[in-house]
Image: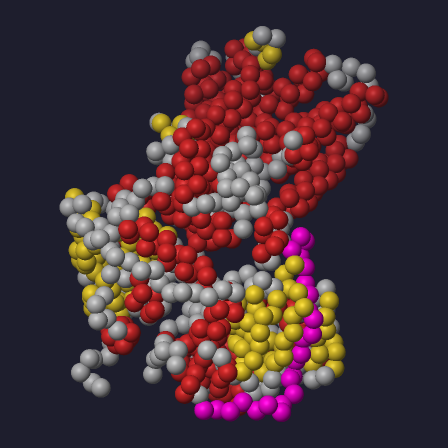
Amino acid sequence: MLSTHPGIAALRAAPVPHDVRPVLSLRGIAKSFPGVKALQGVDLDLFPGQVTALIGENGAGKSTLVKILTGVNQPDAGTISLEGRPLRFATAQEAARAGVTAIHQETVLFDDLTVAENIFLGHAPRGRFGLIDWGRMRREARAILAHVGAPFDPDTVLRDLGIASKHLVAIARALSIEARVVIMDEPTAALSQKEIEELYDLVERLKAEGKAILFISHKFDEIFRIADRYTVFRDGQMVDAGLIADVSEKRLVEMMVGRTLHSIFPERAPRIGKEVLRVEGYCHPTEFEAIGFTLREGEILGFYGLVGAGRSEFMQALFGATRPSGGRCRIDGQERAIRSPSDAIAAGIVYVPEDRGLQGAVRAMPIFQNMTLPSLHRTSRAGFLRAAEEFALARRYAARLDLRAASLDQPLGLLSGGNQQKVIIGKWLATRPRVIILDEPTKGIDVGSKAAVHEFMAELAAEGLSVIMVSSEIPEILGMSDRVIVMREGRMAGEFAREGLTAETLVRAAAGIGEARE
Amino acid sequence: MIATILKRRETMLALAILALIALVQTRFAGFARPGNLAAIFNDSAVLIILALGQMAVILTRCIDLSVAATLAFTGMVAALVNAAAPGLPIGAVLLIAVGLGTAMGAVNGLLVWRFALPPIVVTLGTMTMYRGAIFLLSGGEWVNSHQMSEAFKALPRSLVLDLPVLSWMAILVIALFVLMIGRTTLGRAFYAVGGNEHAAIYAGISVGGTRFVAFTLNGALAGLCGYLWVSRYAVAYTEVAQGFELDVIAACVIGGISIAGGIGTVGGAVLGALFLGVIKNALPVAGVSPFWQMAISGIAILLAVAFNARSEQRKGRIILKSAEQAHAAPAPATGASA
């Protein structure tokens, strides 16, 4: 059963025992990097058999805390104690030996090794002469895999597994070193709904075994579903901690951002104009087929679906980054052949990919050059750049986005993350697109920045730009879209108008559950 | 302002070169004579040209190990053509050398682009092939001075405004690179492709195509240098410029061209080549053995790499709001300072 309703906390019946002592306690932890205080006076307790949710905006210091807990970084001040005994983790190995293990967003395992090798890397069972006892390693791996409910063989090469299965391997590894503290850093970010459910089951099992779990997540529904306690970080400091049963979602959000959010989504009065984009029969041999829709001026079209439904793949084909095997695309009634991203940009379609850091920023390049990169055909004549025009263009969008930088000449990498984002959005707006495709525009960003992105999206639509928003978050789809297309397994599973659209309808369409059965 | 100029590695490198020249001058008066410095520049001309070509390739996050072999092959072909048809105008010989080099560079570029093979492997392969091809072409024989026409040998040495044509060629290539790297969309594409391949793709830049152009350009310059080298030394044989590709890459690294792509300047590459040129010319004067020269070049490379690693090191993340305000400029940007 999927639920995004916040009221679920009220349904929780499991009482949280109050008399247990924490396994791991942090007191007054501080950590600075050159010129930056990342953590200040942080306290944290992790209790056996309980899940503690760590909540905070991006850059609140969560990652630094995980690094300190796993011995990657050492704190400048404060104490860590394990079952009452103070200790120091000088290296990652010491933390692992003490029973602290972390399962990361993108698993840090070895693709070319087998599952058994991954589980026992660094602590393989030894036989005679200190050589690895392969037989015992396989037997023990098989036993642990059976225990976590993994359906694959220990001899499988990791590369052949999906992300969810890799998580299982990471958890199996945690169990093999007899971890007492398991840190899960946004473990569900890349999982489908079904895989998430399986992960929740596993968390329950780990709890039953008395592991203390630190669960880092941006998703409130899952925090209320599986966490027993919460700790809120803001700007490198601990703001509050307590029992989940005693707190509301609204209160958590307020503590996180340090201010009250009025409404999460901007009020819009969409003025939808004439048809801008018409897509017919887009196909790809392995990724999607028969995709067709229209998009109007000033409209926000949501694309919902489970992870792996083929949405991003289709968008990349529409943008010309990959080649579809068939399909036609019209812009303003004119048929356009899009064979490369430069064709798409010329036709007025731009694509802002999911991972803006990886796919958007050229960090060593000056800000103005990043800004003009997709618009060079406009700021040059016969291949020669016009410096004055480049600066004029960059200055215009820097001002429009309220970019804060000492000079547009400085490398992009020197800006803060938020300002880098502005440059990347600015460079796409500078191409003066008709259609902007935003792929997971708010994935992995904090609540405050999310609201800013939504505000901005509404502004673009109000100016007459057509927006395609790919999102896996139902509230965002419902809150922002004028129309929603649901994709499932590479096909269109339905198209819905905003009025009367419910979360349940979307989930059913995305999961392929018939309407009639109830 | 002065502090920022001093911090730039080009300034540091230029100062290091001047210090080196001054040091040798104190022991051997006349080393810093303009005539001698011009001779050092002339001696470094081929290295400068090839360092610039290699820079284009390295900027796109590739590497070309086949430049010296391309140089030797085109040089051999130019020498054989001249020996067989001494009456052929030098312009035609030059065109053949450059055209051949362009084609050889294009082969590298195509293999990297169309077959998505790693550049280091592709050019290691073509390097060996091209060297083998010289042997097949010449049968292992040398083409000696007396087989070459006077015009063939004279061009790089003939003086224009008191400077040999060889030096003028280097100056011309430097000027072309300043224009291309800083003022054309192609130059911008080199930086974008090497700086972030994915960002370049999404910005509508053909990553493979840009790399192809860089390799082809580098091949053309290697072809030019093939003629210049063989005519200057008036001899062509299979092992011409053996190992010279490493000098070229060293010049780039010393000049601050990041092997990871996307970072580097024309000035840096030229100064890197000049630095090696000065060392090569100064140390024999000072009576230092060639083995020490290699050690000193090696130390210079390591120092340059260490310097690069330090300047490219990531700054700490700004997490605290107060630190962000202190770090960021107080007002929205209004334009460039330079």
- In which quadrant is the C terminus of chain B drawn? top right
- In which quadrant is the N terminus of chain B drawn? top right
Residue A30, picture quadrant:
bottom right
Please determine whether, in this image, residue A199 is positioned above or below residue A358: below
- Residue nearer the viewer, A364 or B133: A364
- Residue nearer the viewer, A236 or B260: A236
Q: As drawn, is A330 to the left or to the right of A44?
A: left
The answer to whether residue A491 is magenta is no
- Residue nearer the viewer, A253 or B185: A253
Question: Residue shown at 42%/61% (left/top)?
Answer: A450
Q: As drawn, is A39 to the left or to the right of A262?
A: right
Residue at the farthest top position: B161
The answer to whether residue A20 is magenta is yes
Q: What is the magenta range?
A: A13-36
- Residue A465 placement (x, y as % from top left): 27, 49
- Residue A375 placement (x, y as % from top left): 36, 38
